[in-house]
Image: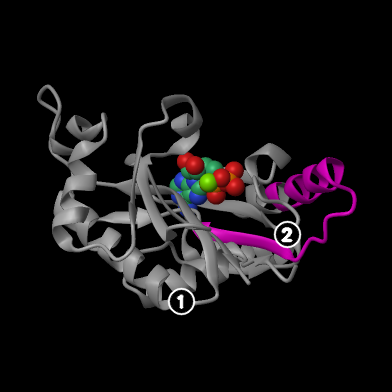
Amino acid sequence: MSERMLSEAAGYQLLRDFGVPAPKFKIVKSAEEAAKAGAEIGYPVVMKIVSPQIVHKSDAGGVIVGVTGKDAARDAYNKIVESAKAYNPDAQIEGIIVEEMAKPGLELILGGKTDPAFGKVITFGMGGTLVELMKDVTLRILPVDEDDIRTMVTEINAYPLISGYRGMKPKDEEALVEIIKSVAKFFEESENVKEFDINPLRLYEEGACAVDARIIID
Ligand code: ADP
Ligand code: MG
């Protein structure tokens, strides 16, 4: 069992290499560094725990969004470390990631897993905290072409939230298609990647941004 989870930072870097937009970030190891990093990135920022043993960071009190300034960043640093230790005393804490706070958008999920029979499969659907509840996801076995991807996008139940529902402006479907293409290419070409998810990818009227990344390699 040599499977391991890459850090969110490493995940962002890998995804960026394939053209998936991700927030600016910095890894810090003290409250003071956190305050400085926030100033460099520009407040408000989001701060999150970096630990290989903590997969669902929110469950561990490991995510604070909307950190508005240096004092808040110092407080958030201490609070996150404390919560993570309380959640799992054995978790090894590598630091805190301080990242650019993305504007609100439609939260989608993009994922991949390796099926013992079918091989690499990609999934796409509604993301955020409602994923489990809504089960509004579709999947394809790799390889996929652009037509497959366009069909995936239109076949989820929430598609009207992308195409424009009741006077809401449509979201950037073209950017989404390009990102799914990039992610499929990333998964196909990365032999050691067994599983991943981007949850959420925030989709806007223009563009999109991944605000979480979990990649399992072997
Ligand atoms: P978890 O490990 O619990 O899935 P996430 O990294 O997904 O943690 O963060 C939890 C939630 O916080 C996300 O679903 C998203 O809504 C919000 N969030 C995370 N990172 C950012 C960011 N950089 N900008 C804005 N919102 C964010
Ligand atoms: Mg997440």
Q: Is residue 21 above or below residue 166?
A: below
- Residue 4: which quarter of the image? bottom right
Identify the residue at the far left of this view. 167
- Magenta residues? 76-99
Q: For numbered disc 2, what is the local secondary structure?
A: loop
Residue 117 position in % (x across, y down)? 48, 57
Q: Is residue 66 visible?
A: no
Residue in the image at 19% along x and 63% along y:
145
What count of labels does the image hold? 2
Horizontal arrangement in the rendering, residue 150 relative to residue 212 (left or right): left
Give me the residue at 48% from left, 67% from top: 12
| Residue 36: quadrant of the picture | bottom right
| Quadrant (top left, top right, bottom left, bottom right) of the N terminus | bottom right
Alpha-carbon span between mark 1 and mark 2: 23 Å
Name the side, left or right, on which 36 lies relative to 137.
right
Which sits in the foreground, 11 or 80? 11
- Judged from this view, the residue extending furthest toward the right is 89
